Amino acid sequence: MLSRTSLPVLLVLALSLAGALLPSAASAAAACHQDGAASVWTAPLRPKPGEPLDIMAVATDGALDQVQVTDGAGQRSTLRTTSTGGPPWGLAGSVSWTRAGTYRIEALRGGRVAACAEVQVGGGEGRRSSGEWDLATTAFFSAWVERLFDAPPDQSLSFDSLTPVLRNPQRNFLFNFLGAGEDRQLTAEPDCADLPYYLRAYFAWKLGLPIAYRPCSRGSRTSAPRCQGSQLDSAFVGSPASAAEFRGVSRHIMDVIHSGSGRTDLRDESTDIYPVALQRATLWPGTIYADPYGHVMVLVKWIAQRPGEPGLLLAVDAQPDNSVARKRFWEGTFLFADTPSAGPGFKAFRPLVRSGGGLRLLSNSALGSGTGLPPFSLEQQGLAPADFYARMERAINPQGLDPEAAHGATLEALMEQLKTRVDSVAKGEAYMRAHPGTTIPMPSGPAIFETVGPWEDFATPSRDMRLLIALNVLEGLPARIRRYPDLYVLRGERPAEAAARIEQLQAQRLDQQAVSYTRTDGSAQRLSLRDIYARRAGLEMAYNPNDCIERRWGASPSTADYATCHRQASLEQRARMEDYRPWFHEARRPPR
């Protein structure tokens, strides 16, 4: 039996023990809470015992430290996660084996719970959405896009279409989210203009969100495209829609959207998208880049600059042959021009929110700092191309770049572009071999850049225009150092001296870099970068798939590889290509 004098001592010990346990006990007892700035998402929608539970925590107000999970038996553990972004910042991981019960998931920052969610494994349903594109949902979309196309920066990332990306559960956090095997029934083949809308529609389907899109004109040489009223579709809101329903909606969207949809004037409010500032904080993954000529890319990842390593901004695009590839930001892929025929630049989708019992797209003025979303900005309005690229360079490499490192990064981007063209031209050659005697009709005038059918699929005028620009960019790097010395870490070296040193380095590297293509007779032909520069004139007329593959790589009667050329475009087509040569020689797209 305990003495009376022992009781106070035991009481003190009990209270001390209770105090030690109080934080976790209080945490377990407190109601789960998450707001737009930080949120927790789980997949699948209806988790089952014995199956994995995928978890993603997303925040827009700062990086998260860890995710802790308390299972149905009260066992608490720290989840092994991979991180993304910033902003939005994300942590993703998986509970590999689950038992029935309520799982509590807490995202922590600085030892405090930033967001919390509870999900019932077995007989329950996880979080789907609020039914509107609020801050939490928009941030989740951004983190989801980044994860879809994540890979080491030095890894070439390309796919025949979007289909294998969405069918990969390691990439697609929403794979089989509805539990109906829905992704195995899909074939996803959007082209460049459709890609951002398709991704947004797919995400809306899985999360139960409305979507908005609108018909637009293609504009003219004196005015940017204009759009009609928005088509608001709530087919995915409420009970989960079937794969067949998604196919129908997405097909209709792709019938409506085209290259003019992204080129609307920056001040125009009758649009699906709005311009944002050229800053890391506002260019989230999922932001689109619409160039002045109709090509569209989707941002997927920022890689911060580190000592001795340049920063990177990565994006993906889709081609007419439905292939999807990751590209880095640079002048050779992100074309920019101040032109009355387009409002080019970086743009984000307008959030679709509830209002007065209905839905509305936020106006430019409503996209302020109070929403937590990237605000509307006219920073890109009226910028000269050189100034646009200089601002982006400062955003990507705020510490500046060593001139040699800048040359190496530019050279690497150019070679990446050339290697991508190898595959593209080979697909055109394969088509012509499979259809002997076929002549692909060639459009007239500016329509060579925008058309449908085999010409769109296998001709490469837009890609070749970008390649010629890319060649000019690398060649012009010394002049850029002289013009924008503040972008470079010169360490006391005069800009003219640094530029001269890079010119010498360029001459040395021209023979070290090369690509190879397969000639008509099946042999391999190596082309050094010096060869490519020497063939620039031939590459100004190398986009026609009716020509042999040797011509498509700039071969001429004076080059050895021309000997195996046994097919060429008609005299009429070649005469028109000669008329269009100045567009490529001057690297400028003609007005519509």
Image (cartoon, helix red, strand yellow):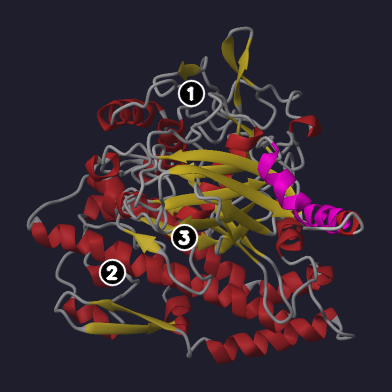
Residue at the outermost top position = 356
Q: Position of residue 84 (x, y in %)?
A: 60, 58
Q: Which residue is mark 1?
A: 210
Question: Mark 1 to mark 2: distance in Å?
Answer: 49 Å
- Amino acid type of disc 1? Pro
Q: CA distance from mark 3 to mark 1?
A: 28 Å
Disc 2: which residue: 551
Specify the amino acid type for callout 3. Answer: Arg
Q: Is 238 in front, or is 163?
A: 238
For the record, the magenta segment spans 10-30
Task: Identify which residue is drawn at 84% across, 52% down.
Answer: 15
Vertical placement of residue 425 versus 269, above or below: below
- Is 354 on the left-hand or right-hand side of 404? left
> Which residue position is annotated with label 3?
326
Question: Is 26 in the magenta?
Answer: yes
User: Toward the viewer: 284 or 323?
Assistant: 284
Q: Nearer the N terminus, badge 3 or badge 1?
A: 1
